[in-house]
């Protein structure tokens, strides 16, 4: 099918409403579903699905926003490295406004630091080639989707013999975060919408034991309105029938085993490590770090920024929002004083942050109830 025609079909209002009516007919009670990915949150709210769905379906927003969960101490390490005169610090653009303890990368750049926005880690490798007298650092954040290109940048730098390239790594993984949410005594989540782009890389086999352990059904979904409502229908149908499976509602893109070539690149460069998640805390084996044979490319070791003291805003409740316990409008700082222009926490900054979605699409407690 032609791509433009496919996209038109996936956004067809008539088909979306028909799928929502199927959900309505299935319901006998209320259910709490979590979309694990911040990109899904924005897609749901931009298309108005959160307001079109039956009121019995409550959508809560998971920690699947890499900018939002990058720990404060790592932001402060990035700031400490970027402030050094010999460093060219490279990052994706949405990291520049994420607040550290005292400032952000954007204000650091305004003060004269050489902080550059790149669109790929391979761009940072090119900058290192072009500036052999400078140290070039790439802020390697993200879930499983960004791990292959981040790993490739390290492999390319090694092949080129670059001694002035390193990565500040904050790679995190979805399944351990789901374990942390589901094992919490405060957990409310009864079903999951899994992120299609993550499953494109990693497949969805790792979610099967999680579904079985916690008796929580899941569906892999894409990001178009019809993809999302079909995923919601899959989960609702399983809940109503008291069935537990992981269904693939995004089969045109996602294979059960994922992309094996991409996984091989990840495994060559990275190994599982414990990670701190901003607002949530330390989750065992929830991230990737460089393997010892690539330690020369580790910016934390190269610049000795291990001893960093951090200070979070006492007003921000990002951790509770990222765990699906509260909504952005429950935060006393939401929209005043916390805005995208003056963010107190990362979820108000990121293009995938729940708070920025609520702010951008004018969602409030009153509108959600209405």
Image (tube, rainbow, N blue to C red):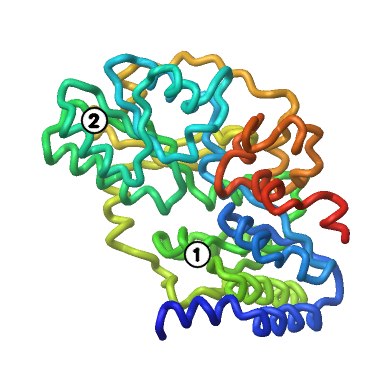
Image position, residue 77 (x, y; %): 44, 22
Circles 1 and 2, Cβ within 8 Å, touching? The answer is no
Image position, residue 21 (x, y; %): 76, 82
Nearer to me, 211 or 261? 261
Is residue 285 visible to us here? no
- The residue beneath circle 2 is 165
Q: What element carries label 2?
A: strand
Q: In which quarter of the image is the N terminus?
A: bottom left
Q: How far apart are marks 1 and 2 (CA)?
A: 32 Å
**Picture disc at residue 196:** 1
Residue drawn at x 28%, y 55% is: 264
Nearer to me, 142 or 183? 142
Image position, residue 96 (x, y; %): 48, 32
Image quarter for residue 118?
A: top left
In this rendering, position of residue 130 left or right of residue 180: left
Q: In which quarter of the image is the C terminus?
A: bottom right
Residue drawn at x 32%, y 21% is: 301
């Amino acid at each position: 099918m032609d791509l433009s025609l496919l996209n038109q079909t996936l956004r067809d209002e008539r088909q979306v409403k028909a799928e929502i009516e199927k959900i309505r007919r299935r319901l006998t009670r209320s259910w709490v579903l979590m979309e694990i990915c911040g990109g899904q949150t924005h897609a749901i709210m931009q298309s108005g699905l959160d307001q079109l769905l039956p009121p019995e379906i409550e959508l809560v927003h998971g920690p699947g926003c890499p900018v939002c969960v990058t720990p404060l101490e790592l932001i402060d390490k990035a700031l400490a490295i970027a402030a050094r005169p010999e460093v060219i610090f490279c990052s994706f653009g949405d990291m520049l406004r994420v607040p550290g303890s005292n400032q952000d990368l954007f204000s650091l750049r305004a003060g004269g630091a050489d902080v550059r926005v790149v669109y790929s880690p391979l761009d940072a490798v090119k900058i290192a080639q072009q500036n052999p007298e400078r140290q070039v650092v790439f802020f390697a954040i993200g879930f499983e989707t960004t791990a292959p290109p981040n790993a490739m940048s390290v492999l390319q730098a090694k092949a080129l013999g670059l001694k002035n390239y390193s990565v500040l790594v904050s790679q995190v993984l979805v399944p351990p975060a789901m374990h942390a949410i589901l094992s919490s005594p405060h957990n409310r989540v009864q079903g999951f919408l899994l992120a299609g782009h993550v499953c494109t890389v990693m497949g969805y086999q790792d979610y099967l034991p999680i579904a079985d352990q916690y008796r929580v059904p899941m569906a892999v979904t894409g990001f178009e309105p019809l993809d999302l409502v079909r995923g919601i229908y899959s989960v609702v149908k399983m809940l109503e029938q008291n069935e537990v499976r992981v269904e693939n509602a995004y089969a045109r893109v996602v294979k059960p085993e994922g992309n094996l070539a991409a996984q091989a690149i990840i495994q060559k460069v990275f190994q599982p490590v414990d990670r701190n998640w901003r607002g949530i805390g330390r989750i065992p084996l929830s991230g990737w770090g460089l393997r010892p044979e690539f330690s020369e490319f580790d910016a934390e070791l190269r610049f000795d920024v291990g001893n960093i003291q951090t200070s979070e805003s006492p007003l921000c409740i990002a951790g509770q929002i990222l765990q699906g316990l509260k909504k952005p409008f429950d935060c006393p700082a939401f929209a005043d004083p916390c805005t995208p222009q003056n963010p107190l926490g990362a979820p108000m900054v990121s293009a995938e942050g729940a708070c920025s979605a609520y702010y951008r699409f004018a969602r409030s407690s009153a509108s959600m109830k209405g």
